Amino acid sequence: MLCTSPARDSQLTSLSFASFHLLCCGLIVATLGAVAVPTASAADWTQYLRDAAHTADARDERLTVPLHLAACVALDDAVLTSPAVVGDRVYVVDQMGSAYCVDPQRSAIVWKTHPLGAGAVGGNTSSPCVVDGKMAYGTTAGNFYLLDAKTGQVLRTIKLNQPIFGAITAAGGRYYLQSLDGVIHCLDGSGTTCWRYDPYAEAPQQPGSRAKRQYSGTPVAVLGDTVVAAVGFDLICLRDNGATVERVWIQRTPITDTYLPVGVSLADGWAFASFPGKDGKGAVVRFKLTTGEIDKDRDVVQGQWAILTPPAIRNGVAYICRQAFGMSAIAFGARAGVVWSSFSDQPESTTPAIAAPTLAGDHCLFTLLSGGLAITRLPDTEALPISHVAAQTVAMPSGAVITSSPAISNGAVYFGSDDGYLYILRSEKANAPATQANRTARHQSKVTPAGNKRYGWPSAFGSPANANYIDDPSVKPPFRLRWATKSGGLFKQAVCATREDVVYVTLGGLVVCREQMTGRIRWRRHLPGQAWCRSALLAADGRIYVPRMFSLRYPKSLGAPSTLYCLSGETGVIQWQAPMGIGDRLRSSPVYYNGVVAFGSLYKEGDPPTFFAGDEAVDQAIDAWDAVTGKPLWQVKIKSSGTLLNGPAGCAGDGVMFFSGGGEGIRDRGQTVALDPRTGRMLWRSEAFASQTGTPSYRDGRVYLPGTYHRPVACLAADTGETLWTNDLSTRRWHVDTIAFGPDYFSVNNKYDGGAWRWDLKTGRPMERDDQPLQLWGAAHGCGAVVLTASGHALSATIGGLCMTDVNTGELAWNTAGFGSYTCPHPIAANGRIFYAPQTSSMLFCFEPITTKKAE
């Protein structure tokens, strides 16, 4: 086995390699001289998922298993794209938009091109295609590139000024792609525009409309003259007429309005689409290619949460990967449903994956978030359904996250990794094992604030006090999109930020650290065990604290531990982990004060932290640990009962931690407590409490309870727990999450009717305008928290996009395009910029004031 890496990584580190005990080596890259343009063959993998229809089916390939790591070639940065293989060359693009041609036999780079230079944006996921001697790909910086496949020379640069997330599709001498604004582009072989289709050109643009322009950018599938793409909430079928294009059909809500498509494949007269789903739902659907019609009994398979890519297709069966569980095969027609999976009902059987699977001969292959390749033999179709087909797993030496879909050609498998290597696997064992350095997190973040202040957003609601307040007057409209990229998961909780990076954890447990300036991934770490957890992380003193708790929503993870993880903020390496109770509905972060980290969860009395039904719970509890070592410090229980019971949420102020929690219904009972952070000594206890996602806030000697889920809004004295005021108006509303503070007012979102009122901070009464409560929420539904700003605005995330309203008038001051997604998380701000990840579109956005210099 041969592995090449740059000279700066020549210091070798010995790493184990699963049961194979393989190691990689560190050598200097050998750049080859000029070579002939590779000749295409039937074994070529010319583009993402092999063909323009995205079937990912190389049925004529024959793999001999087990596979072994044969070589790895060091590139300059993480690889999130899928390689193309033409002749005896491999083509790939790294996350910063550098393109490479590699000789796999010599494990050497033939050429490298970095066309954008210092203006590059991170997180590139647009996989290249290589046809007719040219390599084409897009970038998150908004450019389409056409390169000479022989030399890497840039033949054409087209600036679309919109990020390109999806792969470039090549068919019939043309290139097809979708940009972030939802526009579908068709270019000829020289890069000249043949036509462009804007599905929102004549759509109404009212701020709250689902029909308005939505951010999008999925790959475009092509079969003959038929072009199909997922655009925002819709699935659209077009006919390419050469110089013009016409719409054939559009499906706006094929299942219900809680779903949106993220990828499509075409085969056998059908369009197969993936829908990640809201709130743990999800589906795979097939549509008649000629009409877009579906039979909901035969063409819809639900319960497939968190599919983020197009399915692979063979003989009418769709193969999908789900972020929390692994790969499943989906049949349609009379036997519609899951016919087999790579995982069972046992938590230890899961093989979590994001990248699309591929098919080769009688095998299915998919890359793993845990850092490897999984291979399953396709079972006999006559024996189906089969509940579980075990996968052979080939681990990569560094264990870095892999989201690059594998390409297969002539019995070899190719894919990239977060560690910056292009991996090559073959059936032959390597002759020369050696070592490979782990090169993740090798980039340092450099931040220039958009305004005059430098700050982060270290927890879900911005500070230990949960103020949900942007104390930066420069954060004011209008804004522009600085960058956008694929996030790698789904969310109910907000992202967070250090003073340099954006950090977040997805519902499925992928922890990500990105540069604020470019969106470049510094490191990613997949946490094992729990399938779904909506709690946000905490960044404090160079460490990242991540709660992963059992949820009733996903019983497949019954038996998997509920754990608080502590990761290095610099590398993502797990420094310690500790057991805790379960929880389902918290969107808050752990609470930190002076070397102590604490978090609330749910326990059944007399048992260790384990599963039980929420309405059988006896107590909620707060656990505290030493923030550096993970040593348990104390545990305090809260007497609570009722339905939808959850772990208590907390905040901190003036050297005290405050936690609140309780249940609902006829057995509703809960408490708010004040605790000494070092000892857990209870300073006071109140019978007033916040339920479900309700999170307390602290300001100027007072603790505020947000009145979540029909409870009263309340204000308590921080030193005694005495109730200073309450307001029962919130018992007729559906408040969520927490309070956001303004100078002398606060706001809290009512997620269904009425939005976010402006309330008087001293009295707890709504503040009125024209005899009506002053409404600060945006123009459409959103169930996240409202955020207030020092510039006098309220920031909210809605189905109709991000909204900023004037806090004195309630009038809309700024609105983005829609996210093609529900918007349970709330936006945050750091260093003068706004960061936001919607629930289901697997995107991450950075906006900045237009007054910011573009060169920064």
Image: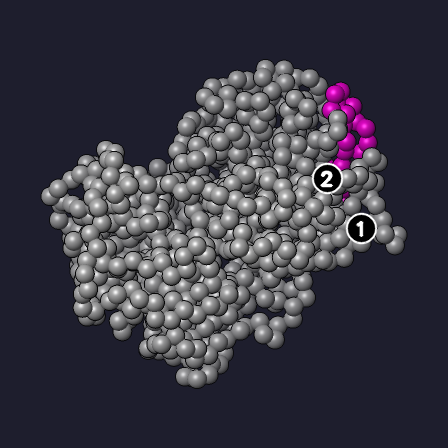
- Residue 143 shows in this picture: yes
Q: Is residue 554 visible?
A: no
As drawn, which residue projects farthest toward the right? 771
Question: Quick one: 421 or 537, which is closer to the camera?
Answer: 421
> Measured from the top left, where is residue 143 in percent x and y?
44, 65
Q: Residue at x 73, y 58 (%)?
A: 812
Residue 665 versus residue 804: which sits nearer the camera?
A: 804
The residue sitting at 50% across, 75% down in the picture is 197
Q: Nearer the viewer, residue 121 or 332?
A: 121
- Give the image location of residue 719, x and y in percent: 74, 21
- Compared across the picture, whether 196 is left or right of 452 comes to left
- The amino acid pointed to by label 2 is Phe
How many discs appear? 2
* Label 2 residue SS: strand
Q: CA distance from mark 2 to mark 1?
A: 14 Å
The colour scheme used here is one colour
Where is 5 relative to 100, above or below? above
Residue, disc 1: 808
Q: Is residue 769 rendered to the left or right of residue 442?
A: right
- Region in magenta: 707-732
The N terminus - image quarter? top left
Residue visible at 45% across and 25% down in the picture:
578
Q: Is residue 718 magenta?
A: yes
Residue under pointer 2:
741
Above or below, 38 against 490 in this view is below
Query: Along the polypeptide, which appears first: circle 2 or circle 1?
Result: 2
